Each structure stands twice: as C-alpha cells, then as structure tokens.
Image (tube, rainbow, N blue to C red):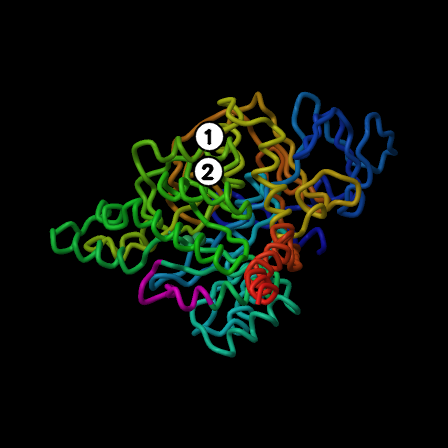
Amino acid sequence: VSESSQFCEAGIGYRQCGASPYSSSKILIKGGTVVNAHHQEIADVYVEDGIIAAVKPNIKVGDEVTVLDATGKFVMPGGIDPHTHLAMEFMATETIDDFFSGQAAALAGGTTMHIDFVIPVQGSLSSGFEAYVEKAKKSCMDYGFHMAITKWDETVSREMEIMVKEKGINSFKFFLAYKGALMVNDELLLEGLKKCKSLGALAMVHAENGDAVFEGQKRMIELGITGPEGHALSRPPVLEGEATARAIRLAGFVNTPLYIVHVMSIDAMDEIANARKAVSNVGEELRSFLCFRFVMSPPIRTSGHGKALQGGLSTGILQLVGTDHCAFNSTQKAFGIDDFRKIPNGVNGIEERMHLVWDTMVESGQISVTDYVRITSTECARIFNIYPRKGAILVGSDADIIILNPNSSFGISATSHHSRSDTNVFDGRTGKGKVEVTISKGRVVWENGQLNVAPGSGKYIEMPPFGYLFDGIDKVDSNYLSSLRAPVKRSKATS
Ligand code: URP
Ligand code: ZN
Ligand code: ZN
Ligand code: ZN
C-alpha cells in the first residue's frame, strides 16, 4: 500500500491524508512495562517488518528507527475481540459498521484483531464464506472468522469439513434463539456438536430458549407492552439459564468443548460455574459493562447481574471479554418504534472494550494487569489456536501492540467515536487508562488521537483446529468406552 493511498479518520467519514510520519518499518518502544499474560517487566520492544524482533532492556538502534517513549506506561498485546458482527445482514437491515469503519474504530480503541461471524447464505456455508471474503476486502487490521450453522443436511456437514480443512475456520456458532430466523433445535445442535468434535472445531452457542422467548414476546404484546422495555421483559434470565444449562449438558453428552457467547446473567453464569467444576472445558465470554437503553440479546440486565459477571471474570468462571459489536444507527433502531420485536438487536463496543475493561476491572482492583492481557487478548488467541503469533509480546509474534497510559483518562461519546453509528451505548462514560498508541502489524495506526489506516491492509488469519480445549477429550472417550465394556468382560469370566 503506497503512502498516498492511506486514509485517516476525521470525525465523520474518512479523508485522505499525507504520508504517515511513522512509515518506517522499524520501531523501538522504549522504557515501558511490557505485559504478557504470564509475566511483566520493564523492557524495550523492537519491531521490524511487522514482527517483534527483540524484547529486552536497553536496545540500541540507528537513526532510521522510529522511537516511541513508553516510560511510565504499559506496553501490551493489542486486544483481540472474539465476537463482532461487521456488515451483517440482520433483522431486515445491515449493521452500520463494515470491515473498514468497524476495524478503524477497533484500532482507535486498542484492538488489533477481531473474529467475526460468517452468516451462511440460505444455509450455504460456502456462499456465506465467499460473501464475507468480499465484505472483508476493505479490512485495515487482521481478522478471523467463526461461522454460524443455521440448517442441517449432508451438504452442510461436508461444508463444515471444507471450512475447517481448507478455509481456516475452527469454530461454529449455534443460535438457540431467534426463532424463525437463525434458531436451531436440539436435534441440529447435537448433529453440529458431533461434527465439531470430529473436526476439532469449537462449538459456540447463543444461549437463550428461542421458543420461550417467542412465547414471552406474545405475552408482552397481549399486555399492550410494545415499547423497548418489552424486549428484556420478554426474555428473562431464566431463559438464558435454561439454554446455557441445556447446551452445556448436550456438549458434555457428546464430550466436546463448548464456548458460551455473551453471558449476560447470573443464571447463565451459575450453570457455567457448575459445569467448569465437573468438565473443565467450557469457554465463555461476557460483555456489557452495564450499558442500557439499547436493545440487544440476551438483554442487558439490571440489578446485580453486571457486578456478578465482573466477579465471574475476576475469579475465572468467565475467561474472556467480547463485545458482540453489532451497531445500528438511530434510524435503524426506529424500525421498532411501535413494536420492540422489530428493533434490530445489537450494540457497539469494539472501540470501547479495552478502555472499559481496564477502568472497570483493573482500576477497581478486581484483576491484575497480567490478567487484563489474558482476558482481552491472550486467552482468545489460545482458545482459537493462534497463540503466540497473536496475544503476546514475544520475539516472533506479530507486532500488534498498544501503549496504555494508566494516568491518562478516556471519555466516550457518539460525537467523537469512530463507529459510523450516531449513537453509543456508553455515551458519557469516562474513566482512567487511555490507549495512546496502537501498532498493527508493525505500523503505528493510532497516535495523538489520529487514525492512520489503509483499507486492504488487514489480513485474514487462518485458525487451525484442535486447540487446547480439545486436550484430553480422546482420553475421556476411551475411559468411557472401557467403563461400558468392563462389566461385560467380568460376566464372561464368571460364566
Ligand atoms: O443483540 C445481539 N447480540 N445481536 C447480534 C447477534 C447475536 O445474537 O450475537
Ligand atoms: Zn491525517
Ligand atoms: Zn448471539
Ligand atoms: Zn453476536
């Protein structure tokens, strides 16, 4: 990409800007506290050609190297957002952020990679994949794909294999909600879980009971409750708890790992906590640091759920934070002005996540700085099997790096954010800790409040199957089989 084709963000829209002052392919980050999930130390980080070339104190370099002073600041792996929906066609419209605007917003907030959900086209995985390859051509940072499974037949089963073996996808999502649209039944879920297991792909679920939500919606409409408050009332926590429990038990029955997306209630978290004691391989995620006003699913809960979820993160019941960035503007949200069922579900977060997790969890003393790196970056890279290329500041890792100043403050507003949406669920929120610099694959893309991003510079990251959550699965299976055979043998011996 030539310098003159670089774009920068100017509040509304994108204007072309001149050559970046940081076009050098060599960068030295001096004097910061380098934080990995396993360790932190004061050291310099030297980057060459998009890769981390050295991490140690007092690195000496020549004049051609761009030097960034990080004294008193934290140098950390860029965030990886495990859950986004860019350019997704959903509920009679399309999300307002595409692969350029959503990623530009991400970079401005310290996130350097995301994993988006490919939605099949009329059930076809390959058509869905092709459509997303097209959508992602304008990418300005690295990204990967999960894929949703919305119907079941031999073709889908075969295509899952192709996605894993040839297309770099190692996770499939099953929606237990959105009846009449994306929802799958238990029979399909079981087929999907078995197939995921055989491919070494991680099954993910959106856990709400869609039939009961449908019933809850009817109930609200009958009561004359058509406004946005009807959304949360129609899908109470018990429906999230039920679907979470069911998915966990069915995954346990098949003996395959499970990742519960957007855990939003104590009910769901309790089920996960119980399951983790027993089977030890449930991945999860939470988002929503108590935002409100806008409709998403599962709904943003009031009264205690948010605080409890923070506790879940700090004690390890929940392993990582995703945003479910799925932004719509106020015109799109207004589709449901007379009927909450027509409000497109989803809120923003891709730009805000790193700041909100820092302020909510680290500033409050609930987690350490190394834990921060783990839940915003490293754990995601491990679960989706791209560690340590991503999620670490180690020699040989991709140079996706942020510099965070713990003494500086951030403020969130719909007028200054980088999403294309005219609303922001976190509008007015302020806090401590500011991402001052973002480096993506060795290029400074965010500094001094300026974005310097180029459409087309982002690359697709293939994610191989059989990540660490699959460790031990075969041993559990063979123990189970021998426990079934044992009594048969004994009865033979005694006959
Ligand atoms: O409201 C939400 N979460 N919209 C995005 C689709 C999903 O459920 O992940
Ligand atoms: Zn500029
Ligand atoms: Zn979902
Ligand atoms: Zn989602």
Q: Quadrant of residue 195?
A: bottom right
State the residue at coordinates (64%, 63%). Answer: 168
Location of residue 436 in the rendering, given as x and y in whole percent from the top left corner: 61, 32
Amino acid type at mark 2 = Ser
What range of the chain is rendered magenta? 177-190
Tags 1 and 2 touching, CB below 8 Å: yes
Q: Quadrant of residue 423?
A: top left
The rendered magenta stretch, by its main secondary structure, is classed as loop
Q: Please give the residue where the numbered disc 1 appears in the rendered image.
A: 411
Location of residue 79 in the rendering, given as x and y in whole percent from the top left corner: 59, 41
Eyeballing the image, is 151 above or below 78?
Answer: below
Q: Residue most toward the front?
A: 495
Instruction: Report the disc number at residue 263.
Output: none
Towards the viewer: 212 or 36: 212
Give the position of the C terminus as an image quadrant: bottom right
Amino acid type at mark 1 = Gly
State the residue at coordinates (40%, 36%). Answer: 426
Give the position of the N terminus as an image quadrant: bottom right
